[in-house]
Image (spheres, grey):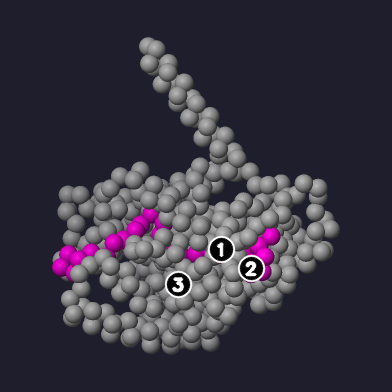
């Protein structure tokens, strides 16, 4: 009996400790002044130098020259001086997968499976403990935030409720992480992603990760199931089996519930299905034609560009993980070169089309030697190598991404009334976009997450 009382007292003490810790973590300083050598506005490209940002209760109150802003500083306010650094809005990753961390399998293992590089890891994620996966998601979220991604849109591969629960835990201050727009389970047609599962178990396995579309009414029901899970966005994967009536029903049901709908669409048929159905964004869109880009522009459909495998990414993550034969090395080198030429043309077509676009990492891969945030940030040099100007890249992960999310009134710019989500780099990201791979200061909601710059 005595041991039980001691155990109860210990649990109560731990509860008090963690509860008080959460309150402290959630409460930003009432008033904070952030000073920096430069403030870059991605929307206009203008630079304010020097710059100061006044923050109250987690939101931006005033932006301007230090002398002007300091005149309104109350007694006792905290000052953070970032020296000559360049201040920017918090970065937005509009397409990520925080609860998936795919390790490239051996070549022989991959060859045994349909979708062999991806499906085995996806099935492992479905089969393993949801609690284990939740801890993985918490780690990925923290690492993204530490690299400057203060807002992300998580588009599937999270189990039934992994990303919605992670979002809620972050919002409650239980774990650190970016603001998350969660989509819960992805809507797919039968046969996407995985095939040839054990017939006795296939339905149960698939339902842990996906909601199946089999006609317009089932598409509506799938959206409603995710609405029950309190999602922020609906994600549909379109292939040649998905019809316009099915996708249009999902779009209508999402919009009825005031949610945007994002469509994974790679080939021309799937892209056209997404366009004709009135989707809010098209993810990837690798085979989009000039006419389809024009239709997207005219309809106001966002193009979410994912540069994941550009810049020889697959070779970089595979090399440390698997034994490569000379033939495979040669094949990957040739593939990287073909992709380099293809995406250079692709980017120029996007830029000249006038379509609204954002950029997402689509990160779900284990990158040896890098945190998840560092792996996500590899999209910046990939986009520049493909010919996208640095200012367009910055807009694609700040102001334009905020509009894609429907959060332009909250994030994406350093402006009064928006959340105090800020990052800083030592140099000039317009001159060198790789500065975004070396974020030195991160603030979310007025709280300092990371500061590697001189502060006093």
Q: Is residue 345 left or right of residue 85?
A: left
**Looking at the image, residue 7 lies above or below residue 234:** above
Residues under labels 3 and 2: Cα distance?
Answer: 22 Å
Label disc, if present, on residue 379 of the rendered structure: 3
Q: Is residue 351 magenta?
A: no
Residue, far top? 1
- Mark with earlier residue (1, 3): 3
Question: Mark 1 against mark 3, which lies toward the viewer?
Answer: 1
Is residue 301 among what the camera can see?
A: no
In the picture, the disc for residue 85 is 2
**In the depicted structure, whether residue 128 falls above or below residue 35:** above
Q: Magenta stretch?
A: 81-109
Front-most of 271 and 55? Answer: 55
Q: Are marks 1 and 3 in contact (CB under 8 Å)?
A: no
Residue 88's x, y, as percent? Answer: 62, 67
Up-down relation of residue 329 to residue 77 (above or below): below
Q: Tell me whether the residue at label 3 lies in contact with that at label 2, contact meaning CB atoms closer than 8 angstroms.
A: no
Q: Secondary structure at mark 1?
A: loop
Instruction: Give neighbour class at mark 2: few <14, some 14-19, many 20+ (Cα, 10 Å).
Output: many
Q: Indicate which disc residue 440 carries.
A: 1
Q: Quadrant of the N terminus?
A: top left
Disc 1, disc 2: CB below 8 Å? Answer: yes
In front: 72, or 399? 72
- The kind of secondary structure element at disc 2 is loop
Q: 425 and 124: which one is in front?
A: 425
Please tell me in which quadrant of the rendered image residue 363 appears.
bottom left
Q: CA distance from mark 1 to mark 3?
A: 18 Å
């Amino acid at each position: 009996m005595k041991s039980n009382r001691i155990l109860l007292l210990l649990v109560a003490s731990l509860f008090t400790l963690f509860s008080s810790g959460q309150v402290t973590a959630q409460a930003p300083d009432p008033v904070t002044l952030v000073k920096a050598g430069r403030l870059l506005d991605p929307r206009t490209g203008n630079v304010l130098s020097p710059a100061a940002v006044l923050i109250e209760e987690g939101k931006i109150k005033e932006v301007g020259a230090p002398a002007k802003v300091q005149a309104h500083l109350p007694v006792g306010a905290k000052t953070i001086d970032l020296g000559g650094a360049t201040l920017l809005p918090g970065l937005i990753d509009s397409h990520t997968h925080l609860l998936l961390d795919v390790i490239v399998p051996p070549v022989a293992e991959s060859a045994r499976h349909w979708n062999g590089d991806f499906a085995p890891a996806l099935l492992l994620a479905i089969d393993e403990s949801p609690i284990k996966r939740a801890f993985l998601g918490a780690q990925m979220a923290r690492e993204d935030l530490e690299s400057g991604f203060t807002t992300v849109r998580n588009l599937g591969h999270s189990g039934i409720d992994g990303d919605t629960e992670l979002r809620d835990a972050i919002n409650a201050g239980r774990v650190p992480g970016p603001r998350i727009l969660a989509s819960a389970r992805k809507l797919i047609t039968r046969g996407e992603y995985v095939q040839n599962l054990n017939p006795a178990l296939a339905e149960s396995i698939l339902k842990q990760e996906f909601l199946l579309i089999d006609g317009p009414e089932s598409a509506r029901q799938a959206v409603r199931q995710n609405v029950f899970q309190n999602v922020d966005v609906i994600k549909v994967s379109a292939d040649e089996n998905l019809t316009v009536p099915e996708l249009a029903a999902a779009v209508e049901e999402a919009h009825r519930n005031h949610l945007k709908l994002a469509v994974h669409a790679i080939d021309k048929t799937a892209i056209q299905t997404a366009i004709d159905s009135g989707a809010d964004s098209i993810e990837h869109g690798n085979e989009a034609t000039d006419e389809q880009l024009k239709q997207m522009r005219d309809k106001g459909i966002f193009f979410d560009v994912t540069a994941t495998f550009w810049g020889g990414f697959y070779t970089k993550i595979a090399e440390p993980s698997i034994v490569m034969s000379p033939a495979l090395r040669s094949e990957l080198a040739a593939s990287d070169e073909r992709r380099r030429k293809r995406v250079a043309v692709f980017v120029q077509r996007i830029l000249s089309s006038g379509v609204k676009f954002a950029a997402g990492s689509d990160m779900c891969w284990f990158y040896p030697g890098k945190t998840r945030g560092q792996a996500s940030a590899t999209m910046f040099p990939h986009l520049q190598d493909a010919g996208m100007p640095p200012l367009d890249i910055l807009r694609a992960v700040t102001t334009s991404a905020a509009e894609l999310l429907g959060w332009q009134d909250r994030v994406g710019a350093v402006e009064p009334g928006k959340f105090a989500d800020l990052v800083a780099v030592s140099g000039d990201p317009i001159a060198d976009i790789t500065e975004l791979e070396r974020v030195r200061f991160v603030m979310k909601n007025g709280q300092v997450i990371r500061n590697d710059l001189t502060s006093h």
